[in-house]
Amino acid sequence: MSRLLLLDGHSLAYRAFFALPAENFSTSTGQHTNGVYGFVAMLINVLRDEDPTHVAVAFDVSRATFRSEEYAEYKAGRSATPDAFAGQIPLLQEVLDALNITHVQLEGYEADDIIATLATQGREAGMDVLICSGDRDTLQLIDEHSTVLYPKKGVSDLARMTPAAVTEKYGVGPERYSDLAALVGEASDNLPGVPGVGPKTAAKWINAHGDLQGIVAAVDQIGGKAGQSLRDNLDQVLRNRRLNALVRDTPIPVGVADVERREWDREKVHTLFDSLEFRVLRDRLFSTFDTAETEVSGGIEVDGTVLAEGEVAGWLAEHASGRLGVDVVGEWGRGTGEVTGLGLATVDGTAAFVSVPRLDAADESALRDWLADEARPKVLHDAKGPLLALTASGLPLDGLAVDTAIAAYLVRPDQRSYDLADLSVRHLGRDLAGGDEEPQDQGMLDFSADDAEAGREAMVRAAAAVELAEVLEAQVEETGGTELMRAVELPVVGVLAQMETAGIAVDRAALDGLESDFAGKVAAAQADAWAAIGDEQINLGSPKQLQAVLFDTLGLPKTRKTKTGYTTDADALADLYAKTEHPFLEALLRHRDATRLRVTVEGLIKSIADDERIHTTYQQTIAATGRLSSTDPNLQNIPIRTEEGRRIREVFVVGPQYETLMSADYSQIEMRVMAHLSGDEGLIEAFRTGEDLHRFVGARVFSVAPDEVSPEMRSKVKAMSYGLAYGLSAFGLSKQLGISTGEASGLMEEYFERFGGVRDYLEEIVDRARATGYTETMLGRRRYLPDLNSDNRQRRQMAERMALNAPIQGSAADIMKLAMLRVDKALTRAALNSRVLLQVHDELVIEIASGEAEKVEELVRAEMGAAVEMDVPLDVSIGLGDSWHDAAH
């Protein structure tokens, strides 16, 4: 039997919004997504569990319906839609479009009326009907073939409301639920019930008299205060009944035949989930359902051979004259690894698997020569990890022609996943299942079944990579990114692998001391917080308990309202402390800071490898701007300007056999990029004269002499200058500086009046991006921004902010990568033993070998200063010291 699933989009998204904290579900551009995320997560579960054949989602258009025309106060008591929820319904509808799920709305009617209409059509067509809604009015639609899935908590826990369940809960069957609701009222719809009459009394009357009509006929016979109250409010009850009755024949433009479940559009899902940053949710979607609107013509086919001893050299001589795909089987991480096998494949699918531990001397020599030959092109997917393993196993790798993960990243930098299997389906229309044939085993009788399976998978992956490379190279060429890939991104892979292998030395004892110190500060802050309220039982990590203390016990001003009370997030508490200066808040904020620092230090301690060094992992394909990301542990989130951050940096020290650490960074790189791209003569003059930039700009903005620019003026100008590079609005600037929006707007106007080139550039970059669909860095890195032409105001404004900051941030990131490459090459060329260990934001950390400090400093200044030609000089600051902190400058 066909099964029809109907969902109330607005009702469920609104519940999801309050079930998931907005601060934990927003994109890097600031778009809140918790309502959309919660709804889609619930939808995946329901589709999986119920397996409907037909699906539709209904939405409200507005609060103006035929019901509000009869009763102006209908739903009038509802609070205003939270700002964080605004704009999420259009986003949800975009997701439904990508999933090929029909959504319907109709002016003058509510979502429940649309659901009632489709449910009625479904029952007439002999379908089972499932209704997922948080509105109790839908309970009147329940019968033996129609069930309501009613959310009990959030949207993840759904109660299955059958006729028996309704009767058990309310004392009447679903066919009489509207009568009961008319008597009791519905607060959410602002429909008052009969005073003094609750669900039990109403159910008793209905069961005694049959239905509301029977109650009305016998109204004079119902005694007691409740009976009189009913008589006094009978018109109101009858009005309630008219209003809560769902319309089952709305003139919607679709019928049940039009909502048959369809395959979704994989490309649209990817694009949209990328922009919403729903990586985990997308993985859940694809792992739960294997259907998508993409032509998959089968698996990647290979003509594969498991090479026996003595056969590797011959196979390479025959097949490795051109480009080969390479897949490394092994393990890697924390700067080291081990290779157990190599899958090799030509573009026509001829493939081989090499078991590295079984190589004889001749084969190993042939393999090593081929791997080291820069003129023999190799294609790998996500090459840095395999390169780490190869290096750790004593095998070289040169001649990396394409890294298919990086190529895909350059084509779609906002994508959140570059998994080879997904790229294969997406670009080749085939999956990695491979053929059914087992690879040929040339006499290796001791080659295990597990080894054979690993070999087959490696050959298929190698074949997919080499075939993908051709497709992706063409797309990279179309986007103007070929030179960026060849001259920057591919060489960076090797340098990052070297850096991860080297790691950076740490003082374990000092780290342990820091952990103890921060633990003590956590305990002290907790004690101070308890003392401030006289309660040693309060859990400072519990939002619910904090709400009770802050707003009930202490009676402090309310923060932003949430479904579970009032928010206790960091920004809200900081604002609350600024207003009240209450000692409990001071201790609470101190407790949170100390806890965060302790967690950071604990993570560093766990990351110390056997060589007493920390090997962070760098990721090239995470940030759409081109910036590198550091993880496991993240060395980019260690505070720079706080005393605690400086103490943490003190534990990163120069290692044995080395003399000192060097820190080299660019001064005000983003502002210099801004000056160059905008061509503003005022900013260019400031940099060329070597004056203090923010004092120079402050003098112009505030119309005073440079020596009259106060620290407060300088601070305001600095915040605004950097804010403009990040697309900061007047509202954002006002929040950052603690001033009114009007004052912030006036400050920006003064700035633009003095620096018109910046104003013109910022306007031009958005207009150009809107016309072309993308922004571009100095080196040609593109970021596509389709939302610049979106009808959704929030999404359009966020895309405009991205268009403002992407060229500046992206150019700074490109320059930093070039600088790192130039420094690394120069160190090698000069035959120096010093080495680059870290890149953190705009800084390089270099471990200096004995006697090389002067040469390296000269080299670093020259190479970083000449990374690119700009209208303003690149200023490089350098410091030396025994620790990362001591090397700061």
Image: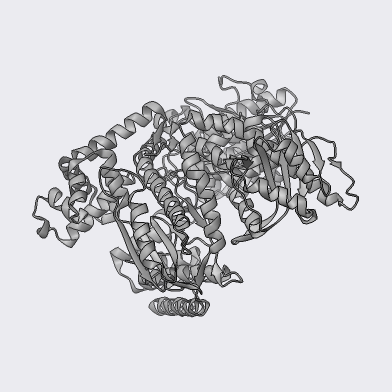
From the viewer's perspective, is 351 left or right of 711? right
Q: Is residue 40 visible?
A: yes
- Kindly indicate the quadrant of the structure image that contains residue 579: bottom left
Q: Is 368 or 36 nearer to us in this picture?
A: 368
Q: Is 367 or 883 nearer to us in this picture?
A: 367
Image coordinates for residue 73, horizontal then vertical, percent: 41, 37
Q: How is the image coloured?
A: one colour
Placement of 543 over or under 119, stated as above or below: below
Image quadrant for the N terminus?
top right
Placement of 421 over or under 720, stated as above or below: above
Image coordinates for residue 344, horizontal then vertical, percent: 72, 42
Q: Is residue 413 visible?
A: no
| Residue at horizontal 57 percent and vertical 27 percent from the top | 247
Placement of 89 over or under 309, stated as above or below: above
Image coordinates for residue 365, horizontal then vertical, percent: 72, 51
- Kindly indicate the quadrant of the structure image that contains residue 297: top right
| Residue at horizontal 39 percent and vertical 54 percent from the top | 560
From the viewer's perspective, is 833 left or right of 260? left
So how many labels did they put on this image? 0
Image coordinates for residue 588, horizontal then vertical, percent: 41, 70
Image quadrant for the C terminus?
bottom left
